[in-house]
Image (cartoon, helix red, strand yellow):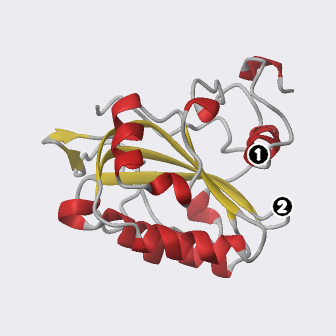
C-alpha cells in the first residue's frame, strides 16, 4: 500500500498544503519517513490524516469560485468503531463548507471496507449542502463498500452506486470531472459514454 500515492497530476492547479483556506494548510511532508498505517501496512506519507486511525485523504482540488472540492480517500471507513464520519464532517467538510464549498466529490476506489453505524452526521452534512444547492457524491466505490453503505441507508444523503462507478477521472482536469459529476447528480445526463469522452 505504500506505493499508492494521492493523485498528483493536478498539483499545478492546486495544493492543499499551500491553500490558506484548506484544513491542511501548512502541512509538511517527509517523502522518506513512513508513519501512517492501514491494517498494519504503511501508506505513502503524502496522505493526510484528519482524526481517523484507518482512513486518510488528500484534497486534490478545491474551487471556491465553483464551490466544489475533489477528495481522494484511502483505507478503511469505520463509523462503527471510530466514528470516521464525525472526523470527516467536523475536521474537513465543515471547514470547507465555511469557505463556500458545498459540492463534494469523494474518490473511494481505495476505500477497502466500510463499517456503518447511524446516519446522523451524513444527514447533517446533507442538510448543510442542500440549503446551498449542493450535494455529496462518492465515485468508484467498491461493490461491497457500496452494499454496506446501502445497508446503513446512506443513499438518502449521498450519491453513490453504478451511475458513479468505473469513472476514469485521472486523465482529465478537475473542472471537467466536476461538470460531469454535477450533471449526473442533477439528472441532466445519463451515464452513457465512458469518462474518456468528457473533455
Mark linked to residue 97:
none
Image coordinates for residue 92, horizontal then vertical, percent: 50, 70
Is residue 142 shown left or right of residue 192?
left
Is residue 74 shown left or right of residue 172?
left
Quadrant of the frame with the N terminus: top left
Image coordinates for residue 42, horizontal then vertical, percent: 22, 40
Image coordinates for residue 2, horizontal then vertical, percent: 29, 33
Residue wearing tag 2: 66
Is residue 155 shown left or right of residue 69?
left
Estimate the spatial distance between the alpha carbons at disc 1 and disc 2, rounded to whole Å: 9 Å
Labels 1 and 2: the sequence-earlier one: 2
Give the tally of numbered discs.
Answer: 2
Residue 20 appearing in the image: no
| Callout 2 crowding tier (Cα within 10 Å): few <14, some 14–19, many ≥20 | few
**Who's the residue at 32% across and 63% down the image?**
84
Mark linked to residue 178:
1
**Who's the residue at 65% across and 67% down the image?**
19
Residue 22 image-quadrant placement: bottom right
Asked if the residue under mark 2 is in contact with the one under mark 1, i.e. CB atoms within 8 Å, the reply is yes
Question: In this view of the protein, which residue sits in the foreground, 12 or 198?
Answer: 198
Question: In this view of the protein, which residue sits in the foreground, 119 or 104?
Answer: 119
Residue 198 image-quadrant placement: top right
Q: Secondary structure at mark 1?
A: helix
Please tell me whether residue 19 is drawn above or below residue 175 in the rendered image.
Answer: below
| Callout 1 crowding tier (Cα within 10 Å): few <14, some 14–19, many ≥20 | some
Please tell me whether residue 180 is drawn above or below residue 21 in the rendered image.
Answer: above
**Who's the residue at 42% across and 55% down the image?**
153
Image coordinates for residue 60, horizontal then vertical, percent: 60, 49
- Taking the view exactly as shown, the residue that stands out farthest to the left is 40
Amino acid at each position: 500500500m505504500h506505493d499508492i500515492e494521492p493523485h498528483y497530476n493536478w498539483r499545478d492547479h492546486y495544493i492543499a498544503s499551500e491553500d490558506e483556506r484548506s484544513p491542511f494548510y501548512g502541512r509538511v511532508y517527509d517523502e522518506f519517513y513512513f508513519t501512517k498505517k492501514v491494517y498494519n501496512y504503511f501508506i505513502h506519507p503524502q496522505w493526510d490524516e484528519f482524526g481517523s486511525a484507518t482512513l486518510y485523504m488528500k484534497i486534490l482540488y478545491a474551487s471556491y469560485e465553483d464551490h466544489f472540492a475533489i477528495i481522494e480517500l484511502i483505507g478503511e471507513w469505520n463509523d462503527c468503531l471510530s466514528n470516521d464520519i464525525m472526523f470527516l464532517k467536523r475536521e474537513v467538510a465543515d471547514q470547507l463548507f465555511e469557505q463556500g464549498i458545498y459540492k463534494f466529490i469523494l474518490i473511494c476506489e481505495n476505500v477497502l471496507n466500510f463499517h456503518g453505524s447511524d446516519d446522523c452526521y451524513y444527514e447533517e452534512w446533507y442538510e448543510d449542502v442542500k440549503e446551498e444547492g449542493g450535494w455529496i457524491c462518492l465515485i468508484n466505490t467498491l461493490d461491497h463498500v457500496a452494499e454496506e453503505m446501502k445497508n446503513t441507508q446512506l443513499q438518502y444523503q449521498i450519491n453513490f452506486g453504478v451511475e458513479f462507478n468505473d469513472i476514469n477521472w485521472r486523465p482529465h482536469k478537475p473542472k471537467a470531472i466536476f461538470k460531469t459529476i454535477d450533471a449526473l447528480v442533477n439528472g441532466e445526463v445519463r451515464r452513457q459514454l465512458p469518462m474518456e469522452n468528457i473533455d
